[in-house]
Amino acid sequence: MRILIVLCIVLAAALVFAIVKIVLLRRGFDELTADIEDQVEGRTQVPVTLTTTDLHAVKAAETINRELDNLQKERNEYLDGNRKVAEAVTGISHDIRTPLTAINSYLDLMADEEDEELKAQYLERIKSRTLSLSELADELFKYSTSADPSNYLVQKNTDESDPIDICRVMEECILSFYAAFKKKGIEPEIVLPEHPVLIRCDAKSANRIFENIISNALKYAEGSLYISLDDSACAVFSNPAPELTPVSAAKLFDRYYTVHEGSASTGLGFSIARELIGKNGGTIESELKDGVLSIIVRFNLARMSRES
């Protein structure tokens, strides 16, 4: 009889132990399910944890954590790729606006111009800007087939590139904005050296830097614009900016920052200029003094050999 009682007690204890273990396992797998859902939906990146010490459950949790970690890495790569795509497309769209604006300005001038010689000059400049659009379209194609969209702004190594005359690049860029200056009633004051200033920089990059700076000046400049270049390859663009403060002037190179909220400006011009000048070994900065904004660009002078 005693043996039967002892056996019943042992069986009851075993049953209680089994029930407790089952309850703990169920709780552990409920926690596992909740943690997996949070991980998959991106609400948390905390590894899956279990209150149970069951070896099989712990091993399953370790396997799941490893796979979730791989999934998170793939998600981050995907999001980073999307960000690069968005930035590159936005940059290309911004660059397309500049030649389109110039073309529209020349077309407006041609509509009111009676001098056939001037019309011919305007037409030649329209052809030049159309060629720029064609080159941008080629860049867009190269970008769309590139494994890394962030390469959109990357140009060839300036140490290997041939020296360019930055004075000539600036002259041609200013000339391309002739119609836009005339339309807005701005007669820029221009001070350039009378001799070549050779630098190490990709020519397209230098032109885009100048275009972005001048485009921005045209949006906000009222009546006057000062442009200069010296023998040290330091370019300065100055225009009155009474609405700017030292704080806002310091933010001009931040991506998507605009002086006027809700304006049509994307805030990308200065940001792209900074990226391009940085990739070509130069610097760009802003200076606000007595209500006048100056954008200062410094290029690297070409070191010529004695034979050259």
Image (cartoon, helix red, strand yellow):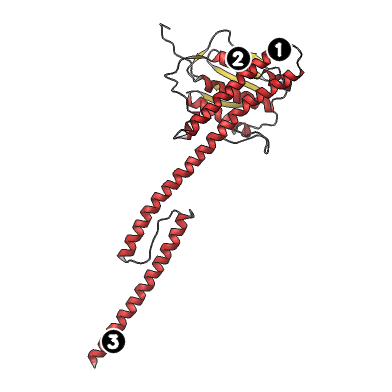
Q: Position of residue 285 (x, y in %)?
A: 56, 26
The residue at which mark 1 appears reads as: 118
Name which residue lies at 70% across and 31% down: 243
Alpha carbon separation for disc pair 2 and 3? 103 Å
Q: Position of residue 211 (x, y in %)?
A: 60, 23
Q: Position of residue 13 (x, y in %)?
A: 31, 81
As drawn, which residue projects farthest toward the bottom?
1
Q: Position of residue 83 (x, y in %)?
A: 51, 40
Name which residue lies at 41% across and 9% down: 305
Name which residue lies at 75% across and 16% down: 113
Question: Looking at the image, is mark 3 or mark 1 earlier in the sequence?
Answer: 3
As drawn, which residue projects farthest toward the left?
3
Q: Identify the mark at residue 8; answer none if there is no mark.
A: 3
Inspect the image, locate mark 3, and give the three-letter code of the amino acid beneath it: Cys
Alpha carbon separation for disc pair 3 and 1? 112 Å
Position above or below: 24 against 246 = below
Q: Is 134 or 17 nearer to us in this picture? A: 134
The residue at which mark 2 appears reads as: 171
Asked if labels 3 and 2 touch by Cβ distance under 8 angstroms, the answer is no
User: How crowded is the residue under tag 2: few (<14 C-alpha within 10 Å), some, or many (20+)?
Assistant: few
